[in-house]
Amino acid sequence: MPLRFLRGIALAIACTALLLSTLSVNADDSASFQILFNGKNLEGWKGLPGLWSVEDGAITGQTTDNEPIKANTFLVWQGGDVSDFEFRCLVRFEGNNSGVQYRSELTDPDGLALKGYQADLHPRADYMGMMYGEKTGRGIIATGGQQVVISADGKKQVTPINADHNAPTERWNELRIIAVGNRLVHQINGVTTTDLTDNHPEAFATGLLGLQLHRGPAMKVQFRNLLYRKLTADQGGELLDSLAAPTAAAETNDEATVKPSKQPLETWLRSAPQPQWVWAKRAGSNQKVWFRRAFTAKANIKSARLYATCDNRLQLFLNGKLIEKSSRWEQATALDVTKAVRSGQNLIACECQNDGGIAALIAKVTITYADGSEQQVATDSTWKQTEKPVGDWKQTGTDDSDWLAAVKINALGEGPWGIPGTATGGGGQKNNLIRPYEITAPPGFEVTQVYEVPRDQGSWVSLASDDKGRLYACDQGGAGLYRLTLRKGQDALVEKVSVGSLQTISGAQGLLWDDGALWLHRNGGHLYRLTDSDGDDMLDSAQQYPGTRGGGEHGNHAVIKTPDGNAIYMVGGNMAPLAEHQRSRVPTWYEGHLITRMWDSNGHARGRLAPGGWITRLDPETKQQTVLTTGFRNEYDAALNRFGDLFAYDADMEWDLGLPWYRPTRICFAASGADYGWRSGSGKWPTYYEDTLPPVVEIGPGSPTGVISGLATSFPTKYRDALFACDWTFGTMYAIHLQPDGAGYTGTVEPFVFGAPLPLTDATVGTDGCLYFAVGGRGTASGVYRVRYVGDQSTDLPADLDAAAAAAREQREKLERFHGLVDNQAIAEAWPHLSSTDRYIRHAARIAVESQPVDSWAAKVADETDPQSKITATVALARRGNESHKDAAIAGLLKLPASELTHGQLLGLLRGYALIFTQLGAPSNPQRQQVIDQLDGLLPSKHADQNRELIRVLAYLRSPTVAAKAMQLINDRGAPSVPPWSDLASRNASYGGRILDLMKSPPPSDEIMYAYLIRELRDGWTQALRRDYFTFLNEAAKTSGGASYAGYLTRIRDEALALCTSEQRVALNEITGENFDPKPDFDIAEIKGPGQRWTVGAVAKEMRGPKDFAQGRSMFFSAKCAACHRLRSYGGAIGPDLTSIPNKFDQDYVIEAIVNPSKHISDQYGSSRVLTIDGQILEGLVVKQDNGDLALYPVGQDAKPVAIPAEDVESISESKVSQMPAELLDTLSAEEVRDLITYLMSAGNEKDRRWTSK
């Protein structure tokens, strides 16, 4: 027998597909239904007022105990009589039974009572779906589980049938009615409950259709997705024949059928003491942390149970023996460790590793003794951790006295983890697949589950469909790549592709079928093209293409065919390094912060710089990449619209909720050359910046995953023109309806498919025109579902065309051909469009200009007279020029009449100044004053965006009025806006709770930004303004936000306090609560030396080695640092407070700032030359007092301040010499230098890990 045939047998895994909606799988897929309910109102229906309404997109009938109804009443369809038909709906009810009436007579027009057949909806299992004769005198005609034939004389012949429909009535279930002649069939969830052949003389052949509200106890019933089709004799016969045909297995995975564990894992973990997620103080990429926890066990141990997992990697030892090794945090370890625990001393030891982003360990051990007592050991601050283990750290006798206390990162069940391995693992997503009836879709759409993924096949996160209609799906981890063939009326065929030479292929976060091959972009690195080398219709060969490694869930993502068919778009998140590229359409990238950025207060993406997430174009022939677009946070997927434009679904940073730099998940048109402005921490660019582009639409909180175009679907026209974007966290697939807007797009968002839990991972369109989506990820239960349109609306391709928008797109595309290429025609063609009011054309023109050598166009900037062209060109020059262009660029913007500019032009002017100052160099004092004079009168503005940017620029320029004006805006603030996210929050209880808290107590985000922007401002304050400032921060802290919200507010407060004098801080104590005493309460050791002439390189070389905290603290005082600088409330107030150093700068920067202090002088602390009216020249640091007088601190460690009355000052000019002496370190020994630098980098924290590193 050929080996290839044997392999085929081994691969064919005949897995039972849970084809839950039997009708949908086995009946005519071409059937078209009339939509009876539009999801919005009761048009086409008639019912008693006050009883019927539309609630959450469902027809809702409700009665109350206070106003009961005396008789059954119906909501009657006004579409006429029904006779032979098929009807479907989704229904749920509580409090009393309901039903669907059909072939009925109206017996009471006023009370809307009906007489006829009823498909009963009843909480009693054998009544659910039965046949009841409403007002006919026949009562129950057939119960559930009966096939009944009634003869003309009224006699019944009853045959039992299996009617195990498993229908919890308070949840959504599917009701289906088939009526063909005298044959009447009811189904619940695809299972026939009643099959009646009625030859009774009082049988009904035709009549009305209605929905019932039952008299008696208060009740509520809801119907949605009501579908109806009239059947011809042939259609009816075929449909009845199909009911007798063999069908696929019914649903078996409903939560109600899952037997509870004898010892439920989640119940145990939630019992006291609950384990905490712990780590070191900060998380870093590829960081290793070791943990230890010793405990003493008594004798007579009956059992011991252990639970543990670590994001990302864990090796766990118990008493020196390796118990578990794992690289998948979502699949937690839960083991019986009775044999490993011993009476007496025991030790749990863990070696943990973080791949990137947030990191944490969680563990719990419970020991049960023979007498029934228990002992608990759970991760908390009693555990010890280090990043530099010594000795045999796995054994009990090892000295760990220098290890640090573990730091709590989050509580059990919180953060991105939930409780791995339980029903709330992976961020609160349940581990049971949702029933398709509980998934909401628009009227006319039907959702069915087509496959439940067994645990050994992993949790599927990527999908692609081939040209034969088969689906390829891949696990997030190492469980492999699979091919899924859906067969009508049969079980699904699942074949493992990751075998033989492909056995290591797994972990795809992007799949694409193209021209007989499967492209696979792997999580953690590399792009592959999988092909069939021997013609047996099985992929067996992999060709690797250049790519990047790393990034995890923020790494390599989707692959998309380019519209010309010649290349592949590759998508990468902000943790994926940008691959080597031959060309970049994005001319440059930079941080672009005028005011010092704050890194995330919880350490996420600390140190991660531009370009952020990216999209490149790969030429498969040359294997060369071209950078298309950058500046995303974590765009998982992208898709093309009918015009060939690419759209990406970018992620938010949920910890930023409530903060002014929070950016919701959003759809971005991935325009050529664009930088979408993601920057780490507080540095995210506003969408109005001239050097970025706005999103097409903002959605809200979420976790973006798959995106697919509707063009290839058999959906109604408007959906074929839509993009479908999947959100993992809130279980929602959005339909994004794009609207051309000039050369770009705007859009609207429609929740298309949603449920809870529904952790959507990816979507694809099959050859049948249906949309298939996968759920899973992070180890959660996984499955594949199908969305099919069965309504009667037109499914034609969209044909409308906006001629003006088409012309604008054409112009944009002409300009884009110059992006990343030097072309002699570029300047002439692009320059006239720098003034375009179409932002996308203006952007395309600027990128075309920036792609050319700067010298070929820099002179044209000065000659521009049109305000918009001047602004656009200046932005280009600031991005691509050098310091020699600074003065002309500033002079050009100063000529513009700022007060006469449009809203957008003024924002562009302000961004232009910011880019000049950050990219080309700081302004001189005269330039600074000129810009202040131009802008100062514009603040405050009626536009919040203008206020933000005016404050930003004026604070940077140290305007004497900006503090008071910003505080006026803060004090006069109105009520904060509340985002419309309540429906979204309801789809995930874990994440949704924080959103609901924010909506109940919304933060003053605009005013927080104003406070953030002036936190580094030294001048222009009065004590009253300072009191208002810190009072506002206290008030803002009482409102709700994301996980980093409170930390950012604390750091804003701390950095603002750092600029206050000792006296001012004492006076503010009642507001700030600061325990402020600048005098040290410890002994200070003197410098011992020997010193030397220290250089930057020499200091850096000596930083390795043992460190002494006490000596480092002493050097801060002995080396006279404390004479000017404060750190942790100790020291002077002349220079910058150094407590925030580790939040702003790295060690190399700090060393250079000390050795070469004049190289980078803060404009807040630079020295000045003061000329007095009597001709005296004084040089030093100038501090303006509240009354306008000056306090001048001369250069020199021991110099006393000089008081200068305001009226004695003739002029103040900038000095190029730092206040700090260059030889500050030269008296210190190598050990003393090392300890001082470490003291600064640790912000004076004795427990900082730097003190234990070698």
Image (tube, helix red, strand yellow):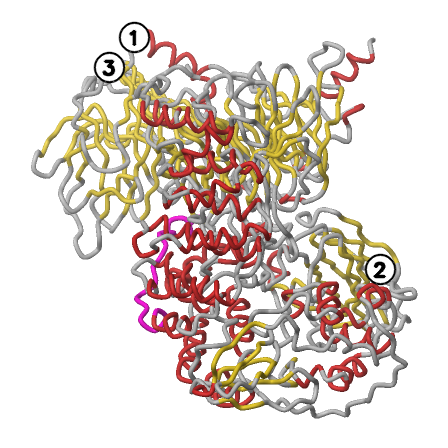
In the picture shown, does residue 1067 fall above or below 1221? below
Quarter holding residue 715: top left
Q: Quadrant of residue 186?
A: top left
Name the residue tied to disc 2. 340
Q: Could you tell me what secondary structure mostly forms the magenta stretch?
A: loop
Residue at the spot of label 3? 152
Q: Could you give the CA–CA distance between mark 1 and mark 2, rounded to whole angstroms? A: 72 Å
- In the rendered image, which residue does mark 1 sit on? 233
- Badge 2 amino acid: Ala
Q: Residue furthest front?
A: 1175
Secondary structure type for disc 3: loop
Labels 3 and 2: the sequence-earlier one? 3
Left/right placement of residue 954 relative to residue 363 reads left
| Disc 3/disc 2 C-alpha distance (Å) | 76 Å
Nearer-N-terminus badge (1/2): 1
Amino acid type at image mark 3 = Ala
- Crowd tier of the residue under label 2, counting other residues whose Cα lies within 10 Å: few below 14, some 14–19, many 20 or above: some
Total marks drawn?
Answer: 3
Crowding at mark 1 (Cα within 10 Å: few <14, some 14-19, many 20+): few
At x 59%, y 39%, the residue is 614
